[in-house]
Amino acid sequence: MFRLNYHNQYFAAYSEASQLNQVKRLWLESLADFPVEQILKGAKHAIENSEYLPTLNRMIECCQAGLVELGLPAPHDAYVEACQAPSPKSAQAWSHPAVYLAGRDSEWFFLANNEERLTWPVFRSHYQRYCAAVLRGESLTIPASEALEKHASEPLSNDEQLAALKKLRESSGL
């Protein structure tokens, strides 16, 4: 995409195949947090808004800007939000439903009780999937938290209270 749009700049910057491979590896590692659809959208944004070949930093900014336009936080910000949210999770004010859903799919206990080096890749994978769904136009919702059943309780009569108290004394040995 960049080779076609920035032909001369591209070949001047990446004239050697070994250099191009190193740059591709660096970009691949640096953009791994974003879904493929977001990277393509970010590249399109960079091409449409700049007459110069974008740097890696500019490309990351373009990818993050696309997420922000949809109300999605940056991937690592979403991870931190999910890890720090108190319980009950579904009752919290989430920045976007994708954050909640990615946290839920990553399992809250796993996120809370393991190191970031273990939990971040799992969360990132789920979050990318939900970001891709949002980019395709899908609407995500947080399921309503389940309410406890309300039992209509009636107080015991005096005789029933005395019988329950007697039973309790007998069972406890008093």
Image (tube, rainbow, N blue to C red):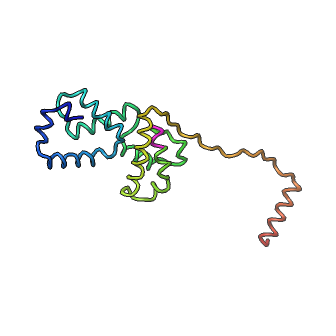
Q: Residue furthest right?
A: 159
Number of numbered discs: 0
In this rendering, is residue 66 above or below 105?
above
What residue sits 53% from the left and 39% below the top?
142
In this rendering, is residue 147 above or below 115?
above
User: Where residue 86 sits: x, y (%)?
Assistant: 50, 48
Which region is colored magenta?
Answer: 96-100
User: Where residue 98 sits: x, y (%)?
Assistant: 46, 40
What residue sits 27% from the left and 39% below the top?
60
What residue sits 86% from the left and 59% below the top?
162
Is residue 50 inside the magenta stretch?
no
In this rendered view, identify the residue nearer to me: 120 or 11. Answer: 11
Q: From the viewer's perspective, tell me whether residue 156 is left or right of residue 107.
A: right
Location of residue 161 by image quarter: bottom right
What residue sits 13% from the left and 38% below the top?
11
Q: From the viewer's perspective, tell me whether residue 7 is left or right of residue 70.
A: left
In this rendering, is residue 167 above or below 128?
below
Majority secondary structure of the magenta segment?
Answer: helix
User: Where residue 19 sits: x, y (%)?
Assistant: 14, 47
The quarter in which the C terminus is drawn is bottom right
Q: From the viewer's perspective, tell me whether residue 58 is left or right of residue 133.
A: left
Q: Residue furthest bottom?
A: 173
Is residue 97 inside the magenta stretch?
yes
In this rendered view, identify the residue nearer to me: 99 or 161. Answer: 99
The quarter in which the N terminus is drawn is top left
